[in-house]
Image (tube, rainbow, N blue to C red):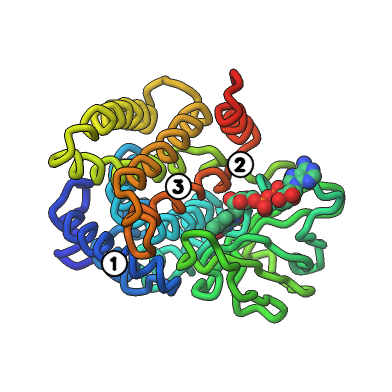
Amino acid sequence: MSTLESSTNGDPQSEQLDALCDFLAAKADRLDQSGRWPAEQLRRCAQAGVFRWFLEERFGGWGWSEEQIARGYLRLSRACLTTTFIITQRSGACRRMADSQNTLVHEQYLPALASGDTFATVGISHLTTSRRHLARPVLLATETAGGFELSGYSPWVTGARHAQVVVLGATLDGGREVLLALPTDLPGVRVEPPERLVALAASRTGVVRLDGVRIDRRFLLAGPAANVMKQGGASTGSLQTSTLALGLADAAISFLEKEAGARTALRPPAAALRREWESRRNELLALAAGSPGAPSEAIRAQANSLVLRATQSALAAAKGSGFVAGHPAGRWCREALFFLVWSCPQPVMAAHLCEMAGLDA
Ligand SMILES: Cc1cc2nc3c(=O)[nH]c(=O)nc-3n(C[C@H](O)[C@H](O)[C@H](O)COP(=O)(O)OP(=O)(O)OC[C@H]3O[C@@H](n4cnc5c(N)ncnc54)[C@H](O)[C@@H]3O)c2cc1C
């Protein structure tokens, strides 16, 4: 580990993180416009040791606490939501691998993931929030003598083309599920061109197809079991989604505050949004530190509501100029829509629909 990296080892407020966030923020509009994979941004994150936050020291990480990670994510997502979102999918894959008892997978992937030499992602939404209403699972696993055969597709996989390994969920006949560390170079794995997205296009998210892919049992991370996603690790509606929503809201409120310097009419709404943001941030950090508080799904609904209102306030203040492609206010509004659909469990979606319809939740 370089001395450059170790200088930020335990500090989500470090100057090195400041410099990284400045770099990410300066590139965010161009990234949004180009829709190209943020290779340079991710390289800088690796250099600053960001990928070490999420892993224990025995895997080459810094073993940051949930609270330190939340503080770090608040800063990164304020600067560039797309890059930060990609990091959440990457760190989700790392955590699932680290939480498993599979020492071969640990040795094969985790040190290179901690340093940033390898990229990993997740294809798990079809076990939680996607295609759940269909009669048949979209990705089936059949047990074979040496492992599993996979057929079907994973509907949403961020950065699959850039990943050496995808943490992938699949369903066995009878409903039990498995979680596997799928090497993307196995025969039969096909990464489709990414979807054209309303925002976060540079996340290069799309379908991964599996045509009779044979995978050895040594890549098994969890299961076969019912609800394999409930075994350890983050769940849908978890704090990280709310943290990223608050990071984006922070960017929008800061813009409003800056505009309010010269426009007094903007001061009361800017101040009210900032008060609400501070209170949500404090609740979230307290929960991340392990204090009892509102359930994470209630926090999520509040964070979503705030990010939608804050970004639209920034656009209203930016007026027509904010509606021109390349202005951050318009991008923030599109990015805020993502929180309505990202890993959004039923109660959170119901809370949004009630709020928008003016009904009591
Ligand atoms: C940009 C982006 C990046 C993502 N990255 C990842 C990733 O890296 N890894 C990952 O695992 N996931 C990822 N996701 C998935 C995400 O977390 C959610 O699972 C996903 O947004 C759910 O949307 P869906 O359209 O698949 O939902 P679905 O529930 O499958 O809905 C699809 C359509 O089915 C219909 N429908 C829905 N429910 C019903 C019902 N009950 N009855 C009848 N019809 C119904 C509706 O018309 C709906 O439009 C990503 C999503 C996005 C948008």
Q: Is residue 71 above or below residue 124?
A: above
Which three-letter amino acid code belongs to the residue tagged 2?
A: Gln
Q: Amino acid at mark 1?
A: Lys
Task: Give, as a three-letter code, the residue at label 3.
Answer: Ala
Quadrant of the image occupied by residue 340: top right
Can you see residue 131?
no
Residue contact between numbered discs 3 and 2, judged by CB atoms under 8 Å: no
Q: Which residue is mark 2?
A: 231
Q: Residue furthest front?
A: 320
Residue 41 in view here = yes
In this rendering, position of residue 217 left or right of residue 142: left
Q: Secondary structure at mark 2?
A: loop
**Residue drawn at x 68%, y 76% as measured from the top left:** 189
Between disc 1 and disc 2, whose residue precedes?
1
- Residue 45 vs residue 4, the one in the foreground: 45
Q: Locate the C terminus by quadrant.
A: top right
Query: Which numbered dot is residue 27?
Result: 1
Mark 1 vs ligand 1: CB below 8 Å: no
